[in-house]
Image: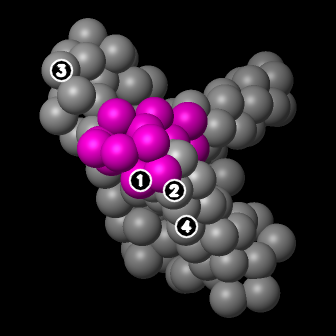
């Protein structure tokens, strides 16, 4: 049973990470004033987050952070995504994203997946 929960939580982690990248891009697009700024921010914000994640937080990353730094960095990336939603006036999606991301990270720690 625990193995099934671990697999489901890993799948949820992947989805939450992809949603966070989408939020970064969506926020970047809505932050820019001119078209070129919108496109640039929509590409740069998620790309920066993805590179940081891949270099320091991914399971097979060479420079992977150790606990508790790993958990703090993951919380920070998810919290920034939630704040972006709140700043755009998307309070309900921001609330649900916050709750799901927090539950996912908590479960990952409890199951020893981090």
Q: Which mark is residue 48?
A: 4
Q: Are marks 1 and 2 in contact (CB under 8 Å)?
A: yes
Task: Say whether disc 1 or disc 4 marks the residue closer to the N-terminus.
Answer: 1
Q: Position of residue 17 (x, y in %)?
A: 60, 42
Q: Which residue is mark 1?
A: 37
Element under disc 3: loop
Question: Between tags 1 and 3, which lies in front?
Answer: 1
Q: Which residue is mark 2?
A: 40
Task: Name the residue rendered at 41%, 53% in the picture.
Answer: 37
Task: Name the residue rendered at 67%, 52% in the picture.
Answer: 113
**Up-down: is 6 above or below 21?**
above
Between the C-alphas of marks 3 and 4, the distance is 24 Å
Task: Name the residue rendered at 74%, 25% in the picture.
Answer: 8
Quick check: can you spot residue 85?
yes
Is 14 inside the magenta-drawn segment?
no
Q: 82 or 4: nearer the eye?
A: 82
Between the C-alphas of marks 4 and 2, the distance is 12 Å
Between the C-alphas of marks 3 and 2, the distance is 22 Å
Q: Position of residue 111 (x, y in %)?
A: 62, 44
Task: Say whether disc 3 or disc 2 marks the residue closer to the N-terminus.
Answer: 2
Q: Position of residue 54 (x, y in %)?
A: 70, 69
Q: Residues within 10 Å of mark 4 (few under 14, many from 20)?
A: few
Q: Which mark is residue 89?
A: 3
Question: Between tags 4 and 2, which lies in front?
Answer: 2
Is 35 inside the magenta-drawn segment?
yes
Between the C-alphas of marks 1 and 2, the distance is 5 Å
Question: Between tags 1 and 4, which lies in front?
Answer: 1
Q: How many marks?
A: 4
Element under disc 2: helix
Q: Which residues are magenta?
A: 20-38
């Amino acid at each position: 049973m625990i193995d099934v929960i671990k697999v489901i939580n890993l799948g949820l982690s992947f989805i939450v990470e992809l949603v966070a990248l989408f939020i970064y891009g969506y926020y970047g697009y809505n932050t820019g004033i001119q078209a070129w700024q919108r496109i640039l921010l929509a590409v740069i914000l998620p790309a920066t987050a993805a590179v940081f994640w891949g270099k320091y937080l991914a399971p097979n990353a060479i420079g992977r952070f150790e606990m508790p730094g790993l958990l703090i960095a993951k919380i920070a990336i998810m919290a920034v995504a939630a704040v972006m939603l709140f700043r755009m006036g998307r309070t309900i999606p921001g609330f649900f994203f916050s709750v799901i991301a927090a539950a996912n990270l908590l479960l990952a720690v409890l199951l020893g997946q981090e």
